[in-house]
Amino acid sequence: MTTDLKDQELLVYESRIKVPYTWSVGEVGSRFLTELKDNKRIWGTKCPMCEAVFVPPKKTCTYCFVTCHEWVELKDEGVLQTYTVVRYDSSLIPGKKPQIMGVIQLDGADTGLVHLIGGVSPDQVKVGMRLKAVFNDKRTGHILDIKHFKPI
């Protein structure tokens, strides 16, 4: 038996595998999603060293690598930092296309939250516009408990 692979024919099988799975969002993610579901409130965590406020919340500061124990309630309003328009169908992005996805920096936060933008057409959306969260009536403990952010 030869161990030399140079004479071997390379076979490639192209396919797509869908594997259902579940995972824990952890204690920090659980508290964040529970607050969305039960109280329609958005919370972040604050670093004790650099005082950066993270939304979505982080257990460990991205900059200082220390544990963030303090929770900060944030307003459900903020500024659109950047966006893109999604024009293809995907089970990951609900709703009729085109759909606007943006990064919203909530008032009081130092990081942005990626979410859907609604109530505005793609040709009217602008970086810097003020947005407000619109919550679903029926909430399940999912990031889409915030239906979308709409212009103020």
Image (cartoon, rainbow, N blue to C red):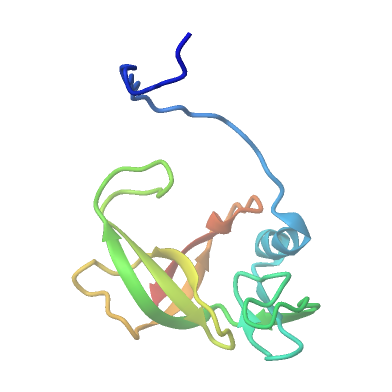
Q: Position of residue 23 (x, y in %)?
A: 68, 43
Residue drawn at 49 percent across, 80 percent down: 105
Q: Which of 92 and 14 is in front in this view?
A: 14
In the image: residue 86, left or right of residue 144: left
Q: Nearer the viewer, residue 15 or 28?
A: 15
Residue drawn at 36 percent across, 43 percent down: 90
Q: Position of residue 13 (x, y in %)?
A: 35, 21
In the image: residue 84, left or right of residue 117: left
Q: Name, please, the residue furthest toward the bottom.
A: 50
- For residue 86, above or below residue 107: above
The quadrant where residue 35 appears? bottom right
Q: Which of 55 and 144 is in front in this view?
A: 55
- For residue 72, above or below residue 91: below
Residue drawn at 42 percent across, 72 percent down: 103
Residue 146 seen in render = yes
Q: Name, please, the residue furthest toward the left.
A: 123
- For residue 57, above or below residue 1: below
Q: Position of residue 16 (x, y in %)?
A: 40, 28
Residue drawn at 68 percent across, 70 percent down: 58
Q: Position of residue 88 (x, y in %)?
A: 26, 46
The quadrant where residue 150 appears? bottom left
Residue 152 seen in render = no
In the image: residue 9, left or right of residue 92: left
Q: Which of 79 and 37 is in front in this view?
A: 79
Q: Name, please, the residue furthest toward the right.
A: 69
